[in-house]
Amino acid sequence: MSDSRQSRPVGCRRLDNVIDDDIRYRAVDSRDARFDGVFFTAVTSTGIYCRPSCPAVTPKRVNCTFYPSAAAAQNAGFRACRRCRPDSVPGSPEWNHRADLVGRAMRLIGDGVVDREGVAGLAHRLGYSSRQLQRQLTAELGAGPIALARARRAQTARLLLQTTELPVTDIAFAAGFASVRQFNDTVREVYDRTPSGLRAEVAAGRRTATPAGGLALRLAYRGALDSDHLIDFLALRAVPGVEEVVAGPRPGVRTYRRTLALPYGHGIAEVDGLAPGDPADRGWLDCRLLLTDLRDLPTSVQRLRVLFDLDADPLAVDDQLGADPLLGPLVRARPGLRSPGHVDPHELAVRAVLGQQITVGAARTLAGRLAEKYGTALPEPNGGLRLLFPTAAALATADPEDFAMPAARRRALTGLCAALAEGVVRLDGGVDRGEAAARLLALPGIGPWTVGYLRMRALADPDVFLPSDIGVKHGLLRLGAPGDPKSAALAAEAWAPWRSYAVHRLWAGPAADLSTGMPSTGTPSTGTPSTGTLSIGTETTAA
């Protein structure tokens, strides 16, 4: 079956076959933020396009045209609304679950592949010709890969112009533009402002002088978000020197911090959870980035969005799981639970093998030892962060005696790392999930649990169930359901296409209390945020 004809899971919101223009207009009239990023409204009488929740006066129906992407609206000659900033909404939730060509392409475009490798590089990664790729993206999204990447660059340029004091020329190249002229023309066309005029819209006092490449921004999300679950999950698995959870800048806030290996350099990311008094549907998480090369800004933001699952549609997920007799009480007790991804699929693959048949704490200790031995040290420590996690290539040639594990798992780890380093196995956002799973299973020592866990987190597959997982078993038993793999798999059929979220529901339970298997909670590390990062001081919403 070709990518373009693959069936899509029941329950996934599609523009063409689920909502029509009348429904879209009703969403605009009610300013329904749940549809932000799902479609965009262009107003012919003003020449601008908006997100559905734009607070401006609702335009007349006859003047509204709807587009599936910001790039399509820009291609049609519409400018971004300066009030609702439609270019900075959360990404479409479709890219979370779609495994066809368009979904895979959008994930790679979001990671900056077009800027780094061009359309030919994107097409090569996807296994299609440039012409086929252009045709399918244009048919569904109203814009080809160049226009989609251009829209992404424009949003990055606005973010840098309005949140930093960086010189305009530096911003042009940091955003991915090939020339200052191209940068100026694009900003004028998309925002109807010169770069200096766009910068002047935000008071200088709200921008941050960041000569070292630091940036404070907001990571937008839709619906409710259970940040405690996310921070707990990451804290329990934090590799010393690579990750940490510390006390945040506001009372009751915890901050997740980690190092990032990026295409042009490295970075340090900080993401704050919500404070006890913050509403779950506040709409953004505060983030700070310290980058050695600002060209890595869009890529680092996209990878953090994947890590925190910020482009999910919690309404669709919770509606379906909440109607289930078994999971319904868990959903009502903790709305907005997300399925965390990862910033580096290769790192996650290594850690998944390290975690086979041992506790989460023991796996974290092993990962820390490997990071100390084979990781890359930062030029200078930043708080508790000192290391970049080892690359697959470094571990593929490592001394087997450094792997304190049984011989069979040691062979599995080195074999996996060699396959990743040589490109035999790919785990990037553009890979076919089924093909990646088959190649993983062909490696010695890689079984169904490891493959499922990697599909769920490294490949952001929302419909993975782990019937043999001990945490899933304990979660089902707590609910009074059979925990054996056959019964678990049978019960999970009703949870498709959101079985990854069901797994996290079972791991987390009604409250943060799991101490065996794959728990989602743990005792976070404590401390104070490093002084090398920026304070929060921008109203900009960054997708």
Image (tube, rainbow, N blue to C red):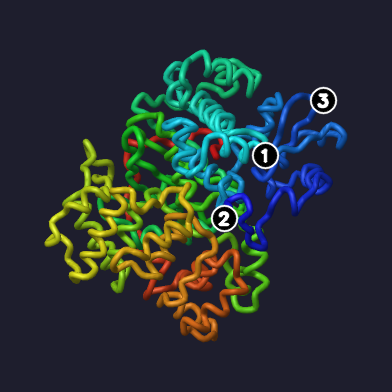
The local secondary structure at tag 2 comes to: helix
Residue in view at x 56 percent, y 44 percent:
220
Q: Label 3 amino acid? A: Ser
Q: Nearer the viewer, residue 333 or 356?
A: 356
Q: Residue 452 carries which label?
A: none
Q: How many marks?
A: 3
- The residue identified by callout 1 is 139
The local secondary structure at tag 3 comes to: loop
Q: Label 1 amino acid? A: Ala
Residue in view at x 24 percent, y 68 percent:
409
Q: Where is residue 197 in the image (x, y as percent from the top left)?
A: 59, 16
- The residue identified by callout 3 is 45
Asked if residue 278 can be seen in this view, the reply is no
Q: Which of 77 and 317 is in front in this view?
A: 77
- The residue identified by callout 2 is 97
Q: Which residue lies furthest to the top in this view?
A: 181
Q: How crowded is mark 2: few (under 14 residues within 10 Å), some or many (20 or more)?
A: many
Q: Where is residue 405 in the image (x, y as percent from the top left)?
A: 19, 68
Asked whether, in this view, residue 327 is left or right of residue 35, the answer is left
- Distance between mark 3 and mark 2 Cα atoms: 36 Å
Residue in view at x 35 percent, y 64 percent:
442
- The picture quadrant where one finds residue 350 is bottom left
| In the rendered image, the vertical position of residue 71 relative to residue 9, given as above or below | above
Residue in view at x 38 percent, y 74 percent:
517
Closer to viewer: mark 1 or mark 2:
1
| In the rendered image, the vertical position of residue 106 relative to residue 507, given as above or below | above
- Distance between mark 3 and mark 1 Cα atoms: 26 Å
Q: Do the residues labelled 1 and 2 touch (CB within 8 Å)?
A: no
